[in-house]
Amino acid sequence: MVLSNGVALSPRLLAWLREQDVRLMISLDGVGTPHDVQRPLINGQGSFGPVMRGIDAALSHGIVPHLSITVTAATADHVAEAVDFALDHDLPFNLNFYRDYANTGDARAWRADDERLIRGVRAAFARIEARLPRRRLIDALVDRSAFDAPHTRACGAGHHYLVVDHRGRVARCHMEIERPITHVWAEDPLEPVRTRGEGFHNVPVDEKAECRTCTWRYWCAGGCPLLTFRVTGRNDVKSPYCHVYRALYPHVVRLEGLRLLKWGTPWGP
Ligand code: SF4
């Protein structure tokens, strides 16, 4: 899977992705201004136009890009429009909640407050309910939560996941790509990834005191371990988005129930 901002997808790259059967994920955080505000080009202009051209170019090469929609304080009121865009174009997508990142300045300015975030995502759910897609969405709508099988970790970081940058450097998570810990030429790049050093540890949800008795624990798995560590300085506590998750889970389950009643297909086309 290649993660891209979508602004510089050359025909050569797209042809290679297609040939090698590599999936493509493009960040699209809103339609027009909300995306431009969140993701300006280096010259300060918005990147929505170039991203649209990138999506069109991918589709013309036979690649269906997966849209990664990151919800922040700048876009929380516009999630529904981004979801509409994905439904209009029949593109797979997922909603990510903002994670504190070293280069983004004041994280509080980027993180939407819980109630606004809930309101924005529920507005997107209403759009989905109005035209329930065949495609299974339940795993894509609440950040890192997944409902395909009970699981104890929200992701594979620190276990079976590694991220490679354009220089072959390897990091434990794409959020830590600027802090590589090894490279692809190492004998076993996964070994240092799995070594518990300083920083975040992806501990099982049952080791998080507040999560142990939570109804949603094996679907939520305690949320993004890196975010929890960055915000709290601890690995063994619940996600900073816990309140949001708990507020949204009943609605996302209901939405999937409605989709199943309409289409009768657990996994979509
Ligand atoms: S919803 Fe909250 S308490 Fe429950 S598993 Fe997730 S982070 Fe833990």
Image (cartoon, rainbow, N blue to C red):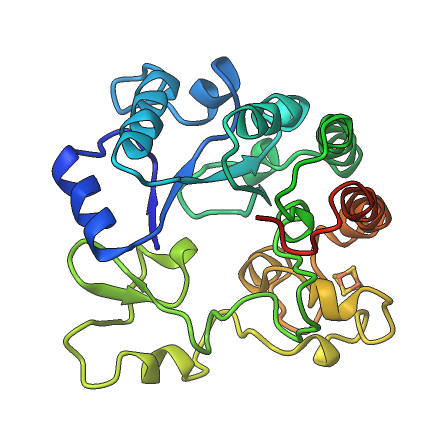
Q: Which residue is at 73% across, 75% downward?
A: 208
Q: Is residue 148 above or below residue 99?
A: below
- Location of residue 78 with respect to 178 vertically, above or below: above
Picture coordinates of residue 21, whole percent (x, y): 28, 55
Residue 239, image x, y percentages:
70, 59
Answer with left or right where residue 149 lies relative to residue 96.
right
Q: Is residue 218 left or right of residue 12?
A: right
Picture coordinates of residue 155 (x, y %)?
54, 66
236 horizontally vs 130: left or right: left
Residue appearing at x 80%, y 42% in the figure: 255
Q: Is residue 149 found left or right of 261 in the rendered image? A: left
Total marks drawn? 0
Q: Residue at x 53, y 24 (%)?
A: 30
Q: Nearer the viewer, residue 230 or 204?
A: 204
Question: Is residue 132 or residue 174 the one in the foreground?
Answer: 132
Q: Quadrant of ligand 1?
A: bottom right
Return the x and y of residue 265 as percentages of the image width and height: 69, 52
Q: Quadrant of residue 259?
A: top right
196 up-or-down from 247: above or below: below
The residue positioned 62% from the left and 48% from the top of the image is 140
